[in-house]
Structures are given as structure tokens and as C-alpha cells.
Amino acid sequence: MSDAEAAAFIAGQKSLQVGTIDRDGGVHLSTLWFAVVDDRIVFETYTKSQKIKNLERDDRITVLLEDGDAYENLRGVMIKGRARLVRDRAEVTALARAVMARNHPGAPAEALQAAADQMSAKRTAVIVEPARVASWDHTKLG
């Protein structure tokens, strides 16, 4: 995919698969909602989660967005990079609000803000700083 196609594909996805490195070197996978802020994928999760513990030890991260239910329809974007952990409560609140607004279109702004304020007390936000991006679109195979 071109950069513009990849950006449009990412914008159309709901869930983000997140891979971090466990203490034993294995991969820890989880799926989260996300947003794109300043051309970076962002998400927030509980500070005590395994993802955050892993990223505190090793900030390498891989995220995947994909779709398609048959080989000829498979599409995806994989981003490998480093995770920037955000703990400042005001920043976490702003990023949590962006994730919630993206995933709850039409929700009242004050409800989104109240939820983000409450969530940010126990959460860390993650900004994915890309080092390598790979994409594929089997619909182009012909």
C-alpha cells in the first residue's frame, strides 16, 4: 500500500493487535482500541497490565491492523517500533479521550471527557513511534 492507502486503511480499522516482549522472551499479544494522534497510533491501558510491565522492561513493540476473510481479500499494516509511555495524567486523559471519541462516535463531548478523566487515574497511554512499516493488500494481486 502507498502511505496514503495505509493511513486510510488504519483509519478504517476498529481494533489494534499489540505485541510486546514478555520477561521470558516470548511474545505477549493483546487487542485494544486505538486512535491516531499526530500521525502516531496511540492507545491506553491499565498501568498494571502485562503490556505496560513488558514495555517498561523493553520498549520494542509491534502493532498489527488487518482484515479480510479470504486470501484474495487479505490486507494489513504492521508497524514495528518503540513505545513511548505517557504517564502525565493530563496527557493520558487527552489520549484516552481521543481513543474513546474514535470508538464512540456521536457520544456527547462531556460524557467522553468525564470517562477519560476517570480512566486516566489508573492508566498509562502508549504512543507507537514507528521504525518500520510493512503493508499488504491482496486485492491488488488480480
Image (cartoon, helix red, strand yellow):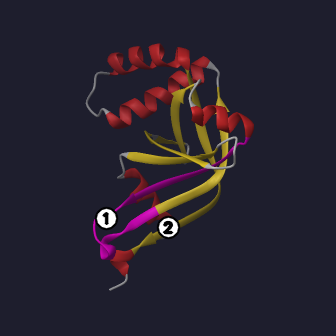
Is 68 magenta? The answer is yes
Q: Secondary structure at mark 1?
A: loop
- Report the mark closest to the observer, 2 or 1: 1
Q: Is residue 111 left or right of residue 91?
A: left
Q: Amino acid at mark 2?
A: Ser
Q: Position of residue 61 (x, y in %)?
A: 63, 48
Q: Is residue 11 left or right of residue 36?
A: left
Is 73 magenta? The answer is yes
Residue under the image location 52 percent in, 31 percent down: 44
Residue under the image location 67 percent in, 38 percent down: 55
Q: Secondary structure at mark 2?
A: strand
Q: Is residue 30 left or right of residue 47?
A: left
**What residue span does the magenta drawing correspond to?**
58-76
Give the residue at mark 2. Answer: 135
Q: Position of residue 129 (x, y in %)?
A: 65, 48
User: Residue placed farthest to the front in the image?
Assistant: 24
Residue under the image location 37 percent in, 37 percent down: 102
Give the residue at mark 1. Answer: 68
Q: Quadrant of residue 97?
A: top left
